[in-house]
Structures are given as structure tokens and as C-alpha cells.
Image: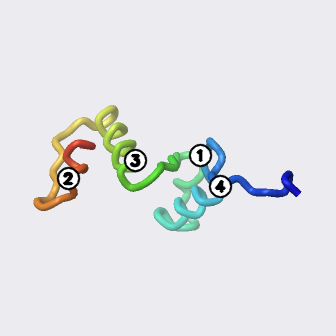
């Protein structure tokens, strides 16, 4: 029985079905950009996703970041 239990977390590479379906949702199901041109990253929590996104932008598209006032207290530290 113990061998049939599921893990409570996704595999280290993330959920490939979720990646595929999210890309279809964002770009459209028949968009040719979907073939070999979309990369996906699965993050832990909204703050984790912001952190990964801002690190990506800082590396590949450095620019000023504007945020609303008010915003969540942790957003400024993440940025």
C-alpha cells in the first residue's frame, strides 16, 4: 500500500501538463510560438514567483521597476 501513495509536491522539474496548458492559455492553442520557444518555471508562492521573475528581468532586461503605492511590504524587498 505504501508504494501507491502520491507525493505531496510536484517533481523537481515542475508539472509539465500545467506548463503546456498555461502556455496555450497565454499564447493561444494554435500559436506557432508554442513550438520550442516557450520556457516555463514553477515557483513556490506568489512572492517566490515575483523573485524569480525580477531576477530574470534583471539579468536580461535591466530597467527601472515601478510599483504602486500602497503595495505589499515584501514587494519592495523582493524587487
Left or right for 33, reference 48: right
Mark 3 residue element: helix
Q: Residues within 10 Å of mark 2 (few under 14, many from 20)?
A: few
CA distance separating discs 4 and 2 = 30 Å
Query: Disc 3 vs disc 2: which is toward the camera?
Result: 2
Query: Disc 3 vs disc 1: which is toward the camera?
Result: 3
Q: Looking at the image, is 10 positioned above or below residue 58? A: below
Which sits in the foreground, 36 or 32?
36
For label 1, the residue is: 36
Q: State the mark number for residue 8.
A: 4
| Image spot of residue 30 (x, y percent) | 57, 66
CA distance separating discs 3 and 4 = 19 Å
**Mark 4 or mark 2: which comes first in sequence?**
4
Q: Residues within 10 Å of mark 3 (few under 14, many from 20)?
A: few
**Mark 1 or mark 4: which comes first in sequence?**
4
Query: Disc 2 vs disc 1: which is toward the camera?
Result: 2
| Image spot of residue 79 (x, y percent) | 24, 43
Mark 2 residue element: helix
Left or right for 74, reference 24: left
CA distance separating discs 3 and 1 = 25 Å
For label 3, the residue is: 48
For label 2, the residue is: 73
**Mark 3 or mark 4: which comes first in sequence?**
4
Amino acid at each position: 500500500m505504501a508504494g501507491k501513495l502520491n507525493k505531496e509536491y510536484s517533481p523537481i522539474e515542475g508539472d509539465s501538463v500545467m506548463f503546456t496548458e498555461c502556455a496555450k492559455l497565454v499564447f493561444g492553442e494554435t500559436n506557432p510560438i508554442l513550438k520550442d520557444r516557450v520556457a516555463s518555471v514553477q515557483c513556490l508562492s506568489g512572492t517566490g514567483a515575483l523573485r524569480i521573475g525580477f531576477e530574470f528581468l534583471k539579468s536580461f532586461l535591466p530597467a527601472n521597476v515601478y510599483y504602486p503605492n500602497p503595495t505589499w511590504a515584501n514587494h519592495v524587498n523582493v524587487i
